[in-house]
Amino acid sequence: MADAQDFIKNPIKNNILKMLMINKRQKYSEMMLEETDNVLFNYHLQHLVKLGYVQKHDNYYSLTPEGVQLTANITEGGLYFPKFINAYKMYLVQDDKVLLQYCNHRPWFGNTEPLTSKVLYGTATEARATVRMQEKIGVKADMKWIGTLRTRVLTPEQELLDDAFHMIMYADKYEGEVKKLDDSKHPLTWYSFDEAIEFETNNKGAGEKSVEILKRLKECNYTPFLFDEVAITKAENCFRKTD
């Protein structure tokens, strides 16, 4: 597989991939940048098709499973993050319920999971998570670190799909009202812990330790931990279907 960084350095290929990542399917004219030469644009588009990262349908284009895997570490803003990343998983708890979001973005479309955010280089763990929680859902919650989870996600062929450290954060008190997010983005819902555990058990890219974390939260067990898990998933199941 090619290096995604090689493609995002080219503004035309960058825009094609970004448009397909965000919209899943795009017409030829919808992907063109203004004042882009048609011949040059078509050359880069067909190059991505030839390499097997983009596929042509009757009147639109979409990413192939290989294209989804290629772009798994590119943000919708066009920034590249290597597979080995650091991020937060932030659990907001209220009585016997936990706040989760339905994930409708690549590569884990269909998962129901806690709020997440990338760890910002040089920032304090708990302070940064507290800030991100307020920015994301509009509440003031004193987020606490309770452990770290490393998850390596492999395809059935044992190829690395994702590798990340997650700082596991939680809060059981907050001020303010959880703002509702647009249903077309990441709708938030309060779920019982039993429901959350069932979701996590079936989530793509999650292993046994991810489930154990929820069980610990349900039991109010905040003993620090360092977990390492491997999850097997199918790359083709990690993106929104276009038909």
Image: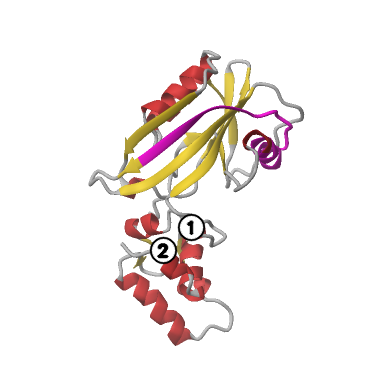
Residue furthest toward the top?
A: 219
Q: Is residue 36 above or below residue 91?
A: below
* Secondary structure of the residue carrying numbered label 1: loop
User: Can you tell which quarter of the image residue 130 is in?
Assistant: top right
- Tell me residue 110's x, y (percent): 44, 40
Q: Is residue 63 above or below residue 187?
A: below
Is mark 1 in CB contact (under 8 Å) with mark 2? yes
Look at the image and tell me whether residue 162 can be seen: yes
Judge left or right: residue 141 versus residue 35: right
User: Can you tell which quarter of the image residue 91 is in?
Assistant: top right
The magenta stretch is 128-152
Q: Nearer the viewer, residue 224 or 55?
A: 224
In what quadrant of the picture does the C terminus appear?
Answer: bottom left
Q: Residues within 10 Å of mark 2 (few under 14, many from 20)?
A: many
Q: Is residue 177 above or below residue 60?
A: above
Which residue is at a point 36% across and 66% down the rendered structure image?
54
* Secondary structure of the residue carrying numbered label 2: helix
Residue tagged 1: 74
Judge left or right: residue 154 versus residue 33: left
Residue tagged 2: 4
Q: Earlier in the sequence, mark 1 or mark 2?
A: 2
